[in-house]
Image (tube, rainbow, N blue to C red):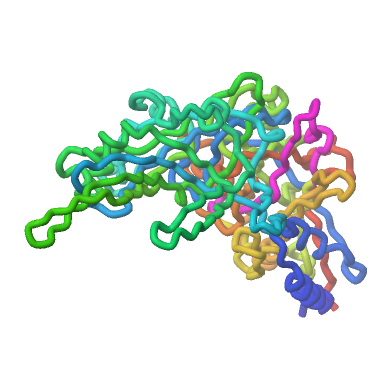
Amino acid sequence: MYNTSFFKKMLVLASIILLYSCDKDYNAIGGDLIGDNHFDFSTYTSNVIAYNQKIGPVQSNDFAVNGLGIYTNPAFGTTTANFATQLSLGSVSPEIGNNAEIESVVLTVPYFTDATKTVTNTDGSHVYELDSIYGGSPAEIKLSVYESGYFMRDLDPAGGFQEAQRYYTNQNVNFDNAKVGNRLNDDVNVAQNDGFFFSVAEYVEKTTDATTKVETTTRTAPGMRLNLNKSFFDSKIIHAPAGKLATADVFKDYFRGLYFKVEKSGTSPGNLALLNFKLGKITIKYKEDLSTTVGTVVTVTRVDKSIVLNMAGNSVSLLEQTNTNALYANATTSPNTVDGDENLFLKGGEGSMAILDLFTTPGELTTLRSNGWLINEANLVFHIDADKMKDVSGVKVFEPNRIYLYDLTNNRPVVDYFNDATTGTNPKNGKLIYGGMINKETATNKGLTYKIRITNQIRNLIKNSDSTNVKLGLVVTEDISTVTSSYLKTPNTFSSRVPRASVMNPLGTILYGGKSTVPVDKRLKLEIFYTKPN
């Protein structure tokens, strides 16, 4: 039987988890709860060979969240994130009456906000703090929204229309060349185009009831809100050719979607935001004639109508990497697969990952299997290279909240991931025992370590002589609950896929590897806590 103190720790952990309900606190949960007080365990440490692997262009269609904007990270370089999406009619075959005239066309996409820091004032107004916005203080970018002329197929003709069509991060040129006409967000307010920024202001709308004259104030949380060209939508939707709004498939070919293109605005460094475009929509408000007949008297009145276009259907995240940091470029171009690399560069998007080889010393695994040890716990602790991740000239370096370790050989989670049923405040923050959350220094709020528990993975490997010592992959992750994969456009030596949640995350971190030249206190090692059989 395994040491009972482990189960006591699990009981303590379960109690602590119940006390945590704040989204922002999840990074600390589980960070140091497992493997700190092993006074009744013996300890074995094993060297780890860990090295870098460049990811390159990768499948990026239909993500839960997509980046939009520009983010310059001194440790890695500049990421420019564009986006393209299909549209769908809120209801097909909308009935549009006589003398229809557009009042407004408004595109909206909500921002992520930190609910724990939202303040409600006495007058009912709110002060918000945005979440998932990266870069300096509110910084401007040039934003252009175009009609897309690129048709995004559902199925791939190369595979006989049996598989879903894949779209990749490096297809920006396809959508850029296929954009149609002038940009649609051509409002005179430059904050909606040439000087766009992710505003924290809530949207306030006042309406007055025509009968009661009572005024109602509606407040909406911050989000992208763009006035689009009314003439375009009058022609494209209100006066669309016959049959073009009749079915979803016909409409998708007729109006192929939107292409969001970002560029630098003057000397501003820009910002990059993660957005759920699936919640985005275009609302077309218009007036039309309503005729009523009483006897022989026909009365015509103007009535308000609206048509909604949802950002539903195929979509793709389009990423461009520029000004690449030389140290990062060299490390991912020439990894040391024999001795391991001194630094591990984990970068989301079209970035990089690390590959880990365990038990590389000849005969090590055989010896461990013959010892008959009872494995109580096994951890990998990754130390962050603080010098390489520090802010540069006032430019803040954002760190990923979480990293994800998985079975690279079989492209699936490790056993400990599957066995961990703990949950955070939402599924994205779960798997608290398995871990991978950043552990930060309180004084500086900068990262120190990430720890991942792989007890069952190691236990099974040592206990079962027929178990395979697989390669492990390490990436940043945007959502620990998402373990499906995206295909690499060009497979590398080790894999043809990477976790989708890694591609969604625009951030990166630099960790110390397991090479012998790394200081001992920072060096990556596998820690095994065990008890000897009686």
> The N terminus appears in which quarter of the rendering?
bottom right
Q: Position of 37 compared to 399: left or right?
A: right
Give the farthest residue toward the top: 266
In the picture, measured across the screen, residue 445 lies left or right of residue 96, that is right
Q: Nearer the viewer, residue 376 or 121?
A: 121
384 drawn magenta: yes
Q: Residue at x 82, y 49 (%)?
A: 440
Q: Nearer the viewer, residue 158 or 95?
A: 95
Determine the image quadrant of residue 244.
top left
Magenta residue span:
383-411
In the rendered image, residue 148, in percent from the top left (x then y), is placed at 35, 32
Residue plotted at (86% across, 44% down): 444
Q: Is residue 153 magenta?
A: no
**Foreground residue among 111 and 340:** 111
The extreme right residue here reads 39
Taken as a whole, is the magenta stretch helix, strand or loop?
Answer: loop
Which residue is depicted at the point 61% across and 53% down?
A: 406
Return the residue found at the far left: 296
Q: Quadrant of the C terminus?
A: bottom right
Measured as percent of width and height from the top left, residue 384 is found at: 79, 42
Q: Is residue 402 above or below residue 231?
A: below
